[in-house]
């Protein structure tokens, strides 16, 4: 059936238009600049920025704040530290004021002025609580510390930016930034001395959770073939626990693997690889490495999150870096290596533990 001339013209017109569009499309796709303009690459957020957003939301939650306020060893540590070291007339920055409790301690201690800064919405409660409790000389600033400026430097930087992995609340970059910009020469950072521990340990028998492929007799059922399906997700290899009853004992004598003084440290001076030896002093199963911290203000003023310290501050978790289970004997040497890309991001931690028998 032949087409009428008008129909023929219409068909050929649209065929040309389609060809022209397809040439234009090819040209756009082949031109990197136009392509990038039409299809901008998705914005990738830096890990620090992602963490900042998480932190801001996490600490707006009242439960996060009440857990810290009810942690008696933590509160006593800060109360004593402030009463001992903040002098009447001091000007103080309280970095990450939360509910404003440390700023209130400093104010009661006679600080001339406290700049209480927090980037989370909890600061609205802090401001109201201070007014209700008759705290007058505190300026509340709803801002991230990196955007906080003053004309005159302060005498003291007060902070509680301590994560379960010590460095995972960005304590080092946040405090160093304020220290370098806004602390008087010779000024005080409270607290400033920290130790990170990573101890080989054994779990209580009734609290042990072996890898699934280590379960070769669950009422006669064998899971050992699951060793072929070891998960790739690094999260699987870190157990999180705040439960004091989990760790039975350390296998060696604990010693800090990293020591930090915030008066002098810079982020780039933290080592990215730490190797250390532990001589086994108590026989047991090696279940993993337990990560915890200590903060020191004076020799008699120490805050600990050690899982076997009865006076530990309970709201901090401690972490178990899991290892394939093995028996170790007194006198064995354990060589642990921890490599880290970014201390503030435990996702980037890797660990190994070698064993040499004494016999
Ligand atoms: C662990 S809480 C401590 C709260 C309070 N100082 C206390 O001891 O109860 C840390 C607080 O710091 C805030 N924060 C963390 N990083 C911050 C930053 N760089 N600038 C401002 N606030 C920050 C969080 O929103 C959170 O409220």
Image: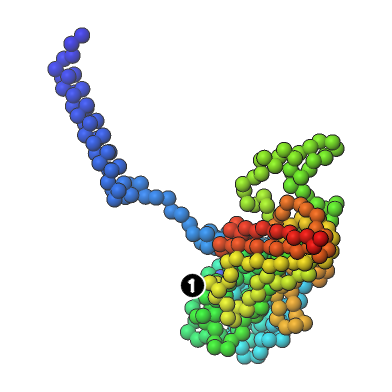
Q: Residue at x 21, y 34 (%)?
A: 20
- Figure check: 22 above or below 339: above
Give how far across and how far down residue 202 sits, in percent.
80, 58
Q: Residue at x 70, y 42 (%)?
A: 227
Give the labeled residue for mark 1: 147
Residue 92 is situated, as x and y percent measured from the top left of the image, at 60, 83
Colour pattern of the rendering? rainbow
Quarter of the displayed picture in which ligand 1 can be seen: bottom right
- 254 shown above or below 41: below
For residue 200, which quarter of the picture?
Answer: bottom right
Extreme residue toward the top, this view: 1
Between 94 and 225, the residue placed more toward the observer is 225
The residue lying at 70 percent from left, 75 percent from top is 295
| Count of numbered circles in the view | 1
Q: Nearer the viewer, residue 7 or 289?
A: 289
Horizontal and vertical percent position of residue 162: 65, 69
Q: Nearer the viewer, residue 267 or 359?
A: 359
Task: From the top left corner, tell me how far across and down residue 90 is, in percent.
Answer: 61, 88
Task: Residue at 47% x, 84% y: name it.
Answer: 151
Query: Mark 1 falls on what kind of element?
Result: helix
Q: Is residue 2 above or below residue 181?
A: above
Looking at the image, which residue sits at the far left?
5
Look at the image and tell me in which quarter the N terminus lies: top left
Q: Does 357 sit left or right of 177 as displayed?
A: right
């Amino acid at each position: 059936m032949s087409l009428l001339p008008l129909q023929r013209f219409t068909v050929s017109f649209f065929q040309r238009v389609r060809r022209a569009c397809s040439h234009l499309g090819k040209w756009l796709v082949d031109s990197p600049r136009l392509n990038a303009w039409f299809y901008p690459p998705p914005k990738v957020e830096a890990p620090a920025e992602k963490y900042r957003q998480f932190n801001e939301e996490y600490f707006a939650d009242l439960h996060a704040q009440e857990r810290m306020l009810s942690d008696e060893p933590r509160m006593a540590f800060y109360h004593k530290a402030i009463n001992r070291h903040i002098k009447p007339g001091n000007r103080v920055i309280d970095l990450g004021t939360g509910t404003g409790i440390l700023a209130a301690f400093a104010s009661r201690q006679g600080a001339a002025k406290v700049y209480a800064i927090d980037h989370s919405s909890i600061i609205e409660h802090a401001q109201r609580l201070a007014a209700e409790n008759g705290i007058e000389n505190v300026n509340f600033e709803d801002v991230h510390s990196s955007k906080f400026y003053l004309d005159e430097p302060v005498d003291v930087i007060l902070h509680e930016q301590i994560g379960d992995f010590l460095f995972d609340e960005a304590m080092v970059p946040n405090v160093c930034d304020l220290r370098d910009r806004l602390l008087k020469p010779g000024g005080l950072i409270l607290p400033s001395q920290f130790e990170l521990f990573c101890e080989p340990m054994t779990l209580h028998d009734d609290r042990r959770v072996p890898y699934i492929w280590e379960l070769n007799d669950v009422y006669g059922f064998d899971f050992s073939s699951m060793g072929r399906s070891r998960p790739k997700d690094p999260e699987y290899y870190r157990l999180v626990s705040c439960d004091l009853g989990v760790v039975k004992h350390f296998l060696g004598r604990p010693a800090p693997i990293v020591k930090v003084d915030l008066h002098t440290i810079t982020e780039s001076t933290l080592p990215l690889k730490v190797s250390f030896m532990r001589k086994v002093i108590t026989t047991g199963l090696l279940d993993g490495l337990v990560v915890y911290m200590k903060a020191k203000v004076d020799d008699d003023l120490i805050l600990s999150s050690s899982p076997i310290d009865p006076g530990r501050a309970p709201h901090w978790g401690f972490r178990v870096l899991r290892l394939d289970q093995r028996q170790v004997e007194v006198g064995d040497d354990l060589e642990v290596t921890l490599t880290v890309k970014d201390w503030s991001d435990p996702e980037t931690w890797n660990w190994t533990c070698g064993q040499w028998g004494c016999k």
